[in-house]
Amino acid sequence: MTLTELRYIVAVAQERHFGRAAQRCHVSQPTLSIAIKKLEEELGVILFDRSSNEVITTDSGERIVGQARKVLGEADVIRQMATEEQNELEGALKLGLIFTVAPYLLPKLILSLRDIAPKMPLMLEENYTNALTDSLKRGELDAVVVAEPYHETGVEVMPLYDEPFFVIVPKGHAFEDLDEVEASQLQNERLLLLTEGNCMRDQILGSCSELASRQRIPGLTSTLQGSSINTIRHMVASGLGISVLPATALTENDHMLFSIVPIAQPAPQRRIVLAYRRNFVRPKALAALQNAIVNAQLAGVSFVAPVQAEA
């Protein structure tokens, strides 16, 4: 049994296809298939059901693949420990971000990180919280930027910043000239939010019962409601309804599209955090990333004090 064979079975379990798994492992399909067959013979169990178009992991295979992921993770720790004398700020960092943060944080983060860690490029993935968490635990990502609440076994959390939400309304709307909007005033409005299951939607509705009472809009499909923040911005600008968006999703030029109105206290907000595996061996890289985010000077947010990164 070798680490290479373990990587092969983990890839097949994830891709559910021998060809795609071989491409991911940068080997030919016959090479991968022969190695897995050899491992099955050595273990005396069938790891994958090959009888259908989609490769299915057997019950025994599920347990063995799960253990293989742990073994590969520990092997990566050993590999990184062997080079820990080297500069932790050199080499790519695999970073995941949720969809409602990535477009607004990344442009400024990249510029900021160039100054702090110019030899630490980012390998990026945008996805939903659950998918990012799975990738983080499998070792496919080094860290993820997500929103609280966030509690996962074996994962540490580093706070980044707190971000308030604002109401956006079409030009000419009755709220346009108000200094702030009471949450109770929103309950009779046509409200545009992201689709169910999106963490930002849940945070908004959890902070404001009036919004929760109006979370469904007759006549709108879930796709129109939840395609993206950018789509919602343009639907509001067109006059379809109002919405609630985080501060980072708003720019100084938005006044030409719609009006932005603060929500009366206690206004809903979200905390953005950096999550990473407990055994991650590049703490200076994480500290550099945190400092780069603070130095990015995102408008409208309150930063948590950064950890000082060492070169």
Image (cartoon, rainbow, N blue to C red):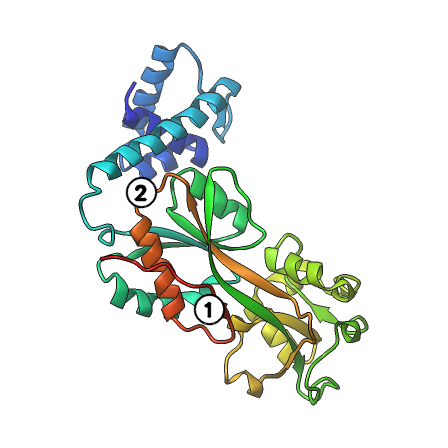
SS of the residue under disc 1: helix
Q: Residue at x 27, y 33 (%)?
A: 78
Q: Is residue 87 above or below residue 290?
A: above
Any part of residue 98 in sight = no
Q: Residue at x 44, y 51 (%)?
A: 144
Circle 2 is placed at which residue position? 281
Q: Residue at x 49, y 31 (%)?
A: 54
Closer to the camera, 65 or 204?
Answer: 204
Quadrant position of residue 287: bottom left
Give, as a three-letter code, the residue at label 1. Answer: Tyr
**Camera-nearest label, 2 or 1:** 2
Tally of numbered discs:
2
Circle 1 residues within 10 Å: few <14, some 14–19, many ≥20: some
Q: Position of residue 143 (x, y in %)?
A: 40, 49
If the image is split into quadrants, where does the C terminus sit?
A: bottom left
Give, as a three-letter code, the residue at label 2. Answer: Val
- The residues bearing labels 2 and 1 have C-alpha atoms spaced at a distance of 28 Å
Q: Position of residue 258 (x, y in %)?
A: 61, 83
Q: Residue at x 52, y 75 (%)?
A: 300
SS of the residue under disc 2: loop
Residue 142 shown left or right of residue 180 in the figure: left
Q: Position of residue 248 (x, y in %)?
A: 51, 71
* Mark 2 / mark 1, whichever is N-terminal: 1
Quadrant position of residue 24: top left
Q: Which circle marks residue 104 in the picture?
A: 1
Residue 23 shown left or right of residue 167 in the figure: left
Q: Position of residue 156 (x, y in %)?
A: 46, 45
Q: Which circle marks residue 201 in the picture?
A: none
Quadrant position of residue 238: bottom right
